[in-house]
Amino acid sequence: MKLNGPDRRISITSLIRLRSGSVILAALALALAIAWQVRAPGSQRTFLGPPLTADQVVRNLVEMNQHRLQALRSYQGKRIYRVDYKGFPGRAARRWW
């Protein structure tokens, strides 16, 4: 904060700037606190029953892997790579897939 005059009093404009900055900072902190507490609808977890056993977890993983494998069988993609070099001793370009 800048002190003005020989008796080093704070100017009114400095005080207003300090207060407006504090208000903005307080509003930002409040908005962040509210956003931290608010959750999207349906994001709360509900208790559906007793915890799963290790065998049930493994069975679920295997089942989901099978679903993923079947979905990926119908997937096709093509990647194309391209390199352009400009430097010593000259230029070079390469493209492959």
Image (spheres, helix red, strand yellow):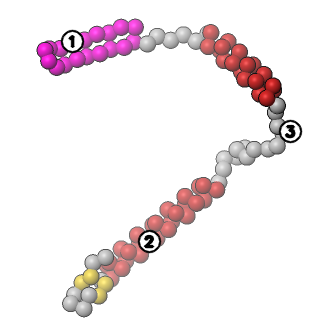
State which tag comes first along the sequence, 1 or 3: 3
Classify 40 as above or below 50.
below
- Mark-to-mark CA distance, 2 and 1: 57 Å
Q: Residue furthest front?
A: 54
Q: Which residue is mark 2?
A: 22
Please check the rendered image and state whether residue 49 is part of the magenta-colored stretch, yes or no: no
Q: Which residues are magenta?
A: 80-97
State which tag comes first along the sequence, 2 or 1: 2
- Quick one: SS at disc 3? loop
- Mark-to-mark CA distance, 2 and 3: 50 Å
User: From the image, which quarter does the N terminus lie in?
Assistant: bottom left
Q: Give the residue type at disc 1.
A: Ala
- Quick one: SS at disc 2? helix
State which tag comes first along the sequence, 2 or 3: 2
**Front disc: 2 or 3:** 3
- Residue 51 appears in which quarter of the rendering? top right
Task: Identify the disc placed on residue 50.
Answer: 3
- Residue 56 appears in which quarter of the rendering? top right
Main SS class of the magenta portion in the image: strand
Classify 39 as above or below 91.
below
Q: Is residue 35 left or right of residue 82?
A: right
